[in-house]
Image (tube, helix red, strand yellow):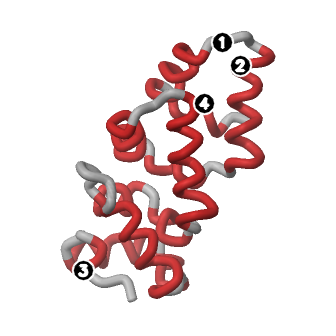
Amino acid sequence: ALCVEDSGLSAPALASLIRKAPYVLLYQPDTQITPVLECLQSFDNLEVAQVVRGYPEVLGLSVDGQILRVCNLLLEIGLDGRMIQQLIRDYPAVLGIPVDGQFLQILDFLELDLKIDAADIVRIVRSFPRTLTLS
């Protein structure tokens, strides 16, 4: 289950998270929560508790089907590991943006329709990550 040791949250912070997002109790501990926490902990300087507090839905995401795909796509467009960690820290909801739909459509729009070069797309994503959620 979601416990203090695994999440990096203090007991009061975990209680606050559950009050804020009670649906996290519906996530499967072994198949959803634990793999996500392990994935997030694999980043060197990422404060997992901060990510979970900022975007509790992260605990229900698929590691391979969503989180790693987002990270790989961010690497492909030119962000390095440090930039990705900072982006996740500042805007953890980036991990939940649907890759096949919204994420790729926005990147295509920026690159193909608006003719924005790769370096500027990186700057936009780093500075205004919510751009990736536009529809």
Sort mark 3 into few (<14), some (14-19) or many (20+) by Cα contacts within 10 Å.
Answer: some
- Near-viewer residue (102 or 64): 64
Q: Mark 3 — residue? A: 4
Q: Distance between the residues labelled 3 and 2?
A: 43 Å
- What SS does tag 2 mark? helix
Q: How far apart are marks 4 and 2 (CA)?
A: 13 Å
- What SS does tag 3 mark? helix
Q: Can residue 94 be seen in this view?
A: no
Q: Label for residue 24?
A: none
Amino acid found under the numbered disc labelled 1: Ile
Q: Label for residue 116?
A: 1
Q: Distance between the residues labelled 1 and 4?
A: 14 Å
Sort mark 1 into few (<14), some (14-19) or many (20+) by Cα contacts within 10 Å.
Answer: some
Q: Mark 4 — residue? A: 131
Question: Given this view, does label 1 or label 4 mark the residue nearer the observer?
Answer: 1
Amino acid found under the numbered disc labelled 4: Thr
In percent of the image, x 40 and y 75: which residue is there? 19
Amino acid found under the numbered disc labelled 3: Val
Location of residue 45 in the rendering, given as x and y in whole percent from the top left corner: 24, 49
Marks 4 and 2 in Cβ contact (< 8 Å): no
Location of residue 17 in the rendering, given as x and y in whole percent from the top left corner: 36, 71
Amino acid found under the numbered disc labelled 2: Glu
Answer left or right for 76 relative to 22.
right
Location of residue 116 in the rendering, given as x and y in whole percent from the top left corner: 66, 12
Q: Is residue 35 above or below residue 90?
A: below
Q: Mark 2 — residue? A: 111
Sort mark 2 into few (<14), some (14-19) or many (20+) by Cα contacts within 10 Å.
Answer: some
Q: Which of marks 1 and 3 is nearer the N terminus?
A: 3
Q: Can residue 98 be seen in this view?
A: yes
